[in-house]
Image: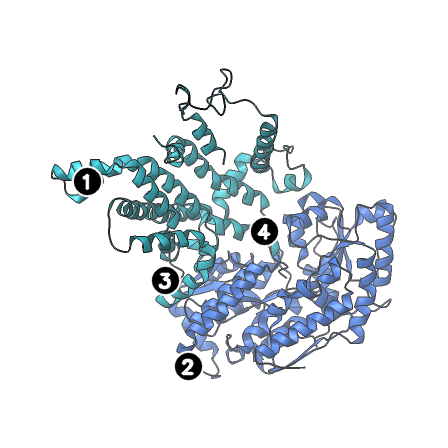
Amino acid sequence: MSTPLTAAAKTPTTPAAGSGKGTPRLRTPSKKHTPGRPKRSVLLTVLTGLMLLYTVVPLIWLVISATKTQEGLADSSGLWFADDFALWSNISDTFTYNDGIFTRWLLNTLLYVVLGAGGATFLAILGGYALAKFDFPGKRGVFATVIGAVAVPGTALAVPTFLMFSKMGLTDTPWAVILPSLVSPFGLYLMWVFATEAIPTELLEAARVDGASEARTFFQVALPLLAPGIVTVLLFTTVATWNNYFLPLIMLKDPDWYPLTLGLSAWNSQAETIGGDVIFNLVITGSLLTIVPLIAAFLLLQKYWQSGLAAGSVKE
Amino acid sequence: MRKTTSRLMRGIAVLSVLALGATACGGSDDSAGSEPVSGDDITAALEKGGTIKVWAWEPTLKTVAADFEKKYPKVKVELVAERSGDKHYTALTNAISAEKGVPDVAQVEYFALSQYALTKGLTDLAPYGADKLKDKYTPGPWNAVSEGDAVYGLPMDSGPMAMFYNKTIFDKHKIAVPTTWDEYVDAARKLQKADPKVFIANDAGDAGFTTSMLWQAGSRPYKVDGTNVKVDFSDAGAKKYTDTWQPLIDEKLLAPITGWTDDWYKGLGDGTIATLTTGAWMPANFVTGVPQASGDWRAAPMPAWTKGDKASAENGGSSLTLPELGENEELAYAFVEYANSGAGVQSRIKEGAFPATKAELESSEFQNTEFEYFGGQKANEIFAESAANVSDDWSYLPFQQYANSIFNDTVGKAYVSNTKLSEGLKSWQDASVKYGKEQGFTVE
């Protein structure tokens, strides 16, 4: 997570004590190393380099391996290309294997992300805004609940949720994946903090005095100010839903409703069965195709993402 | 034949038991009883048509389903093949517990069959005429699907054991291919001496393999009579096995590679693993999983415990069953019979499945098939002979699936610590007995 650091470092911080007369100077900022250009540290560079390797090598492995046939995968070293370059045939095989079930899984994942992550973000915005800008009895109770909920991993709730859904007859339907995804305590908390900082209460008061309804105040005044935070929460929930494995694993039986994560795992386990078709090459290519949209989303929304995370870190 | 039972899966197994508790009150058993179902009933159902849901991962069933639909145009077969092994059983158990979404036909491996049969989860197929098919099948698989007069499934494939060996490696180091287990241990030492990178086999603890070895050695650790169960790993056969296998572990002659992983496929391809003793269904996995070693491998009879002894065992294999809560019984049975006894058998053999039917195993066409992967060897001759030499008095536990899931916590210790194999088997026995009692079995 080097992004927030860079973002924070780029934010111009005025050397507050710089010009004050008689103020004790704890550290004199030399001209060479202004806060914008901090002194280089060998140790930090090496550590960051290691971190870079640690995160990038698996990705390189994935890209290189996706160019290999099943035969090439076993024959060649993981970090260099095999003799055959089979990326294109792997991609087309991935989409055509088993009557193109991969496309179906891709669409399922998109459905879960659009409804689940989109819904979670929408709910987080509404809740966060209300908690930040309205006073009502029980606010502290809500705060405690949300903070507590952030600490509970979703996996721990999967089993009770399954039992509940099975009584309601919702298992094995897309709702079983979408409904639990709608709740994002962390998103709510983030929106809350963000809304507190980003929307001046005076602005809302001004809007009210001018006669805007609460709905109009929210949609036309507050919402544009919240945009960076919304993108941040949207990215968080999208990643969580896109990569969700355990919840669909226990909820879904029908492979037609599988998301990509479950589908790829099913392909992978084909190698573990008698007479099973061993398709590690398609599992790898499928994995690569699965992460491409996420990477694209991050790169495209990077600008918002950074300002969103840095919000509230600097008092202006 | 699934090897990996992760803790996660076990967690899900517990979950399904919970779900059972939550929905058990609605249970009612209103099945038709054992009224015979005539062939006319089945023909009428086929003419009327309908849709059957089939949960089976056996890849050759895809063609069978298409052929079946062609033959009976009014019948539609919905084949769900994405789940296998543990995931499949979890889904099946959950569906049965929830009494919702139960498939009409389900693939069940032999080792797990009695578990479902005993919990009244499967329809007895004898009233449909399945009992008359007994002589069509080899003894091992038939013994697995039948219990007294009841027949809980039709055998789909079988896994008479053979030893696959990498001929190139044995030739290179001029080591004779072992025919007895003593020679096998000897060859293991020689191979390691010649090239420390070569292991005679991979074994990191595998319940299916160990039980098959015990089966061949004449050990009968499980005795099952209804809900009376006996578990005992202390007979002479078990001792024969542990005495032979212990030195292989002690001298580190086995590659610590878990079966069915990518490491395993790699090891089979690059010469790290020199032999593989397993079921006769393996060639299909060799062809798709280890294409780079085509021509290196050959098949041989499973090593014997005493020279000249032909006793063999089964490893893996599965049947098609009709879960009791499924619907369209007549259509479902017609499909199962078509796939495992009728025309489906031939088309499945063509695609690499290993049959459980005598006629096909003994046919000259089958026996004369030359395996290009094995350098043109007529490997089916070896497999068919093995199938005929499987003793049919073996039984698995009615909770074998659970027992296999705790194998690595008990016997598996022998592979990674100073625990002896025999001690490991003893603690496996104790844990199985304990679980059986908890489940309401009378266990000795």
- Vertical order, B63 against B122 (above or below): above
Q: In the rendered structure, which disc, 4 or 1, sits on the residue that comes first in sequence?
A: 1
Estimate the spatial distance between the alpha carbons at disc 3 and disc 4, rounded to whole Å.
33 Å
Packing grade of label 4 (10 A; few <14, some 14-19, many >=20) is: many
What hue does chain B carry in this figure?
Answer: blue
Using the rendered image of the protein, determine whether residue B330 is visible from the camera's viewpoint. no
Give the labeled residue for mark 1: A217
Residue bearing the label numbered 2: B30
* Amino acid type, mark 2: Asp
- The chain holding disc 1 is A
Q: Reading the chain from its start, which is encountered first: label 3 or label 4?
A: 3
Give neighbour class at mark 3: few <14, some 14-19, many 20+ (Cα, 10 Å). Answer: some
Among the 4 quarters of the image, the one containing residue B313: bottom right
Q: To which residue does mark 3 refer?
A: A170
Q: Position of residue B417 (x, y in %)?
A: 75, 59
Residue A277, which numbered label? 4
Query: In the image, is B162 to the left or to the right of B31?
Result: right
Which type of secondary structure does the marked residue at label 3 adopt? Answer: loop
**Front: mark 3 or 4:** 3
Mark closer to the observer (3, 1): 1
The quarter in which the C terminus of chain B is drawn is bottom right
Chain drawn in cyan: A
- Going from N to C along the chain, the mark reached first, 3 or 1, is 3
Q: Is the residue under label 1 in contact with that under label 4 (CB below 8 Å)?
A: no
Do the residues marked 4 and 1 share a common chain? yes
Q: Are marks 3 and 1 on the same chain?
A: yes
Res B396 quadrant in image: bottom right
